[in-house]
Amino acid sequence: MNASALVMGIVNVTPDSFSDGGQFLDPERAIAHGRQLAAEGADVLDVGGESTRPGADAVTAEEELQRIAPVVRALVEDGGPAVSIDTSKLAVGEAALELGATIVNDVTAFRAEPDLARLCAQRRCDVVLMHMLGDPRTMQQDPTYDDVVNDVKSFLAERIAFAISEGIEEERISIDPGIGFGKTVEHNLELHRRLGELADLGRPIVFGSSRKSFIGQLTGAPVDQRLGGTIASNVIAYANGASTLRVHDVGPIRQALTVAEAIYERGLR
């Protein structure tokens, strides 16, 4: 378990994200939302312009750029938390880095556009490599694994090796098991339980379970009422070694993390 964890606030500039699609499509609303997350204690603001929910439609690089550019620019100029760009497109990543983003969070782990890895190496930015079975259009169509943790671990090891081969410094790489990205409820729960096994890869773990459908399947809660389940999931992920928690509700998660850290620092179980 880490002594402390970072909180990454989600800024979706999309019309169709599973949880908050359309709420922050207007750039000014998205910028205000990012500033609110910063005020609540976000360490990183993760800006995305394309939904990756199951069944989501792809968007062009041009449309994605139009959505994210004013938001990234404004949040960088604020001089607050680091800004991450949630994209798998070379053109979008390049523009966001030019605007001052310092992290590329790629849900395809450089499989969609491998040249994005070379760009990240050249710019010496941090990267997040995530596991996803298939793509957002197909990932929830009967996902199967021999052993979900071992399969995710093997995939991430291969993608780390690829990133390094493209010139990305190993210390700039984080990994994400991809909760909800081509996983059943039981797959997601097993990744929670055995998250520590991914630490064998030697890279920090980013964890994103906020408001996801497995919480709704377990509890019956609609997407806008899953904060309790999200807190439980993230505290357990922190206890099992997550270094960064990617969430919608920064304030409550920051509070839960503060208490969890205090308990563990005092050696209580």
Image: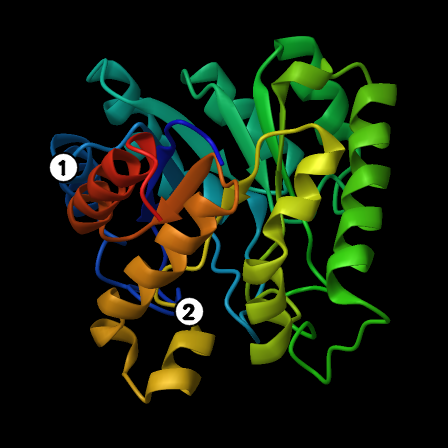
The percent coordinates of residue 47 (x first, y second) are 38, 39
Q: Residue at x 36, y 51 (%)?
A: 235
Q: Which numbered circle lies on residue 40? A: 1
Q: Residue at x 82, y 39 (%)?
A: 157
Residue 105's disc is: none
Image location (x, y in percent) of residue 65: 46, 39
> 234 left or right of 98?
left
Q: Position of residue 186 (x, y in %)?
A: 61, 78
Mark 2 to mark 1 CA distance (whole Å):
21 Å
241 and 127: which is toward the camera: 241
Q: Residues within 10 Å of mark 2 (few under 14, many from 20)?
A: many
User: In the rendered view, does 70 fall on the left or right side of 141?
Assistant: left
- Quarter location, residue 173: top right
- Which color mode does the image show? rainbow
Kind of residue sitting beneath label 2: Lys
Q: Which secondary structure, mark 2?
A: loop
Q: Earlier in the sequence, mark 2 or mark 1?
A: 1
Q: Amino acid at mark 1?
A: Glu
- SS for tag 1? loop
* Residue 129 in view in this figure: yes
Residue 125 in the image: above or below residue 191? above
> Residue placed at 57% from the left, 16% from the top?
125
- Reading the image, the residue beneath label 2 is 212
